[in-house]
Amino acid sequence: MISYLQAENITKSFGDLVLFENISFGIGKGQRISLVAKNGAGKSTLLNILAGKEDYQGGAVTTRRDLRIAYLEQDPQYPAGLTVLEACFHSDNPTLTTIAAYEKAVAGEDTDNLHTLMADMDRLGAWDYEQRAKQVLTRLRITDFTMRCDRLSGGQLKRVALANVLISEADLLILDEPTNHLDMDMTRWLEDYLAAGNCTVLMVTHDRYFLDAVSTDIIELDNGELYTYQGNYSHYLEKRSERIAAGAARRESELNLFRKELDWMRRQPQARATKAKARIESFHDLEERLRTPRGQEAVRLDVQASRIGTKIFEARNVSKSYGDIRILDDFSYTFSRYEKMGIVGNNGSGKSTFIKMLMGKVSPDSGTIEVGQSVRFGYYSQAGLDFDDGMKVLDVVTRIAEHVQLGDGRSMSASQFLQYFLFPPEVQHSFVGRLSGGERRRLYLCTVLMTSPNFLVLDEPTNDLDIMTLGVLEEYLRGFKGCLIVVSHDRYFMDKVVDHLLVFRGDGEVKDFAGTYTQYIDWRQAYDESLRTASQETKPRPAQRSRTDTARKLTFNEKREFDGLEAEIAELEREKSGLEAELNSGTLAVEELVEKSRRVAELIELIDTRTMRWLELSEIG
């Protein structure tokens, strides 16, 4: 295997906080490695180091000569004023740099550099890049290519950055939470893109189905140490369980030895022989090892829910639109006691708007939503809480409650509650500004659950939470004695915690599906396939087909369109060839040069569109 990157004895700390020390690993060509760790362990920091964005205290990172790395950051940023398409070409890649310079020269009528840039475009084979960029952006549901990036939402900007990385043709892709802000269809497309291509990838993601489908190797960062597993996520879970079991057995053995040695230490006189001194040193070494944390501690989320009545909420003939975009159209639903509902659908289909209407933050255009008097919402919003970075972690929680009520009349202090959420005392007394993005999310979750709600509404709760916390949250939600609505694209999480789905299909259409997320995906694929099959079987299919037979299955209008497309494509190709010859002649005036350059770009797009339509029609039947 060709080595792309080698990290040797890397150490990183912030003051007295050591994230990792003397860790080593390598990335080889064709590997798709997933980095797994709890929030705050340093996943994003390690990615920043490998991408050359952050310094480190010790060790070395070496890469193959001329290795091209493309990095998708957790919160990408672009220079002010860039459009979506310009952001896609914002890269150190020579081809993308040339395209960006060419587009700038055309827009600014810079004829001095235009001929040179056109020659570079020919040499690099860059003319089809713009079309490729538009195709990737369209798959990620970004269709306004001229919109400025500073006007995009955080989710849209993340998808533009993802497109930028995917078209960069880098040797190594480093992806920090690539599935955040992707809906089900986009996530599955990205799965196929990465798994089918010859990509080399290092990524951090909480999406466990995505991990299973894409990963060839798993690296776990646990208590500053690195563990490597060859295989996908399912294989990792199996081998990790074996490692933890072996570690627990070894620790138990060391505890037994420690008890025996401690008894010996207490019984021995102060004067020691040389042999006894060696035994004393061994005792202290063993004592130090046993002080090391066991690893991921269990998070107990047995917070008591307040009582809830029989009436939860009832939606009657609710409609909601934003301009021409319909969110709900005469929607009615009665929510049952202890119901656990998942809400899924493409981005922009209205899921978060529906939640805001339920919470009374947005009013419907017509219809009513009546909420029971005993309902006590716990709302975890996609936007999160705007914490004061100057506050201490413990103060954030004690502002809500000094004690948290548990079941059976028990209670715990706010500090104890935070410890169950893996916030040790030293972190509790540090400032919020020092927390990682995932730790801030975990703290936000604490603030929601500790109010003892009886109706949890969680809008994209899995974003930025580590896999360990997600597993604990799943266990809590399955045993939660209250009502639950979850909006999420995380298939694994949804399969674990909800009883049924509300599927927002766009244009006001909402489907109630009695099953899990995976069952819905399987059903939808089977349904779509049955529609395609039914369409193909509307006419009897002959045993032997010829091109002429295929053409006969076209409608009269489609046949005319099909015949006309061949002639139109040929004419467009002729016009494009003629314009390219004129552009290369060096005799055109500035205005003509700019005008004809723009026409060539239009022709390339027209030819691609017409060719795709010709292929669609040629395959009918």
Image: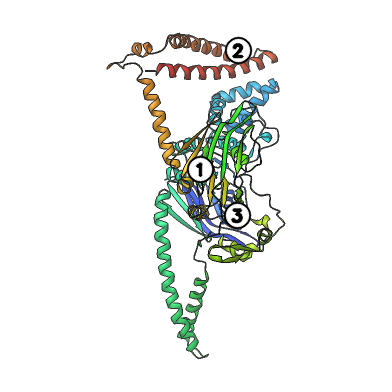
Q: Amino acid at mark 3?
A: Glu
Ranked by sequence position, the earlier of labels 1 and 2 is 1
Marks 3/1: CA–CA distance: 25 Å
Give the residue number, with chain letter if any, for mark 1: 342
- Residue 45 visible, this orientation: yes
Query: Residue 603, relative to residue 403: is it above or below?
Result: above
> Crowding near pointer 1: few (<14 within 10 Å), some, many (20+)?
many
Ranked by sequence position, the earlier of labels 3 and 1 is 1
Give the residue number, with chain letter if any, for mark 2: 582
Give the residue number, with chain letter if any, for mark 3: 439
Q: Amino acid at mark 1?
A: Gly
**Image quadrant in which the C terminus is located:** top left
Marks 3/2: CA–CA distance: 60 Å
Q: Position of residue 4 (x, y in %)?
A: 49, 45
Marks 1/2: CA–CA distance: 59 Å
**Image quadrant in which the N terminus is located:** top left
User: Which residue is nearer to you in this view: 528 or 508?
Assistant: 508
Ranked by sequence position, the earlier of labels 3 and 2 is 3
Query: Residue 540, relative to residue 399: is it above or below?
Result: above
> Crowding near pointer 3: few (<14 within 10 Å), some, many (20+)?
many
